[in-house]
Amino acid sequence: MDKKSKIAGISILSNCLLTLLKLFAGLLSGSVSILSEAIHSAMDLLASMIAFFAVRISAKEPDTKHPYGHGKFENISGVIEGMLIFIAAIWIIYEAIQKLMHTEQMTSLGLAAGVMFFSALLNFFVSRRLYIVAKETNSIALEADALHLKTDVYTSLGIGLGILIIWLTGISIFDPIFAILVALLIIKEAYLLIMKAFDPLLDAGIDSKEYDKLKKLLITELPLETDIDALRARLNGAVYLIDFILKVPPQMSIRDAHTICDNLELSIRKAFAEADIKIHVEPKNN
């Protein structure tokens, strides 16, 4: 099992544990905000499972039906995860409004707060590891999973503090209010995730910082009297699809032009780990 699959598996295990703990604490205490977090963690668990299978599928070699590989499965999983998070947020808001209309006394607040703080701590470490691996492997599926858990850190801390306030003041109306705030944060998270995952499905170019990095690298590596034109770059899952025109002096031999292309490809792959590079050579106008 590769690094991406291993960390995705760890995310599944942690989300499974936290979903059960939050569900237990929410039912025991009667806290709608903790139950909302249980729903959030359940969505995270489903998202982690989707991410796990997405990184496994995306790692498959190109075949006759998919000559460009299976990388976009990660983007599809990211869109699905974002939609699931959005649905969960709407459900949380609905439950919180019902709780505002029918306020009930809460119990076992110490245990409830403890579960929230434990959840925040566990998700902090898992999300940080997920994010590191996502950046190392350029995985949108793992980055989406890391974003879920990072948001869960903040929401769990917020709800834990809210439970402590209720414990100190005895005012239980804070519980559904905190649940609604959690849901609004989740909606924002879902929107950002869907936008990031959806763009590569439309073959959008890489972000401006990466594009500038690529262009600067090429200009630096180009021999004298050569130039580049029509530089394009996009993502196919974790793979950069890069193509451009290399303009060389008309008298340059095919062998020399090919050597320049090989050197440029080597430099690109050092900066962009996984890259599919196509270079079209044209004579340069004097």
Image (cartoon, rainbow, N blue to C red):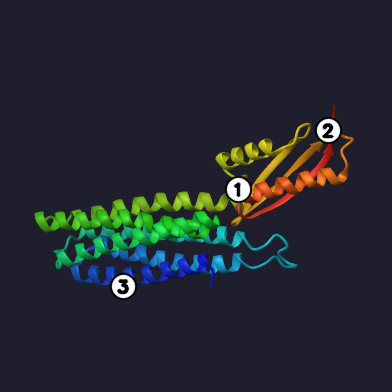
Q: Which residue is mark 1?
A: 271
Q: Amino acid at mark 2?
A: Lys
Q: Amino acid at mark 3?
A: Leu
Q: Which residue is mark 2?
A: 284
> Of the residues tagged 1 and 2, which is closer to the observer?
1
Please tell me whether mark 1 sits on a helix, a strand or a loop: helix
Q: Amino acid at mark 1?
A: Ala
Say few, some or many: other residues with alpha carbon within 10 Å of mark 1 (under 14 / 14 to 19 / 20 or more).
few
Please tell me whether mark 3 sits on a helix, a strand or a loop: helix
- The image position of residue 152, as x and y in percent, is 34, 58
User: Is residue 153 or residue 213 the one in the foreground?
Assistant: 213
Kindly tell me whether residue 171 is visible in this rendering.
yes
> Of the residues tagged 1 and 3, which is closer to the observer?
1
Query: How far apart are the alpha carbons under marks 1 and 2?
Result: 27 Å
Query: How far apart are the alpha carbons under marks 3 and 2?
Result: 66 Å
- The image position of residue 183, as x and y in percent, is 34, 54
Q: Work out whether 167 lies above or below 16.
A: above
Q: Work out whether 146 lies above or below 265.
A: below
Please tell me whether mark 2 sits on a helix, a strand or a loop: loop
Please tell me the numbered disc located at residue 58.
Answer: none
Residue positioned 57% across, 69% down in the render: 56
- The image position of residue 85, as x and y in percent, is 42, 59
Q: Quadrant of residue 104?
A: bottom left
Residue positioned 33% across, 72% down in the render: 17
Q: Quadrant of residue 165?
A: bottom left
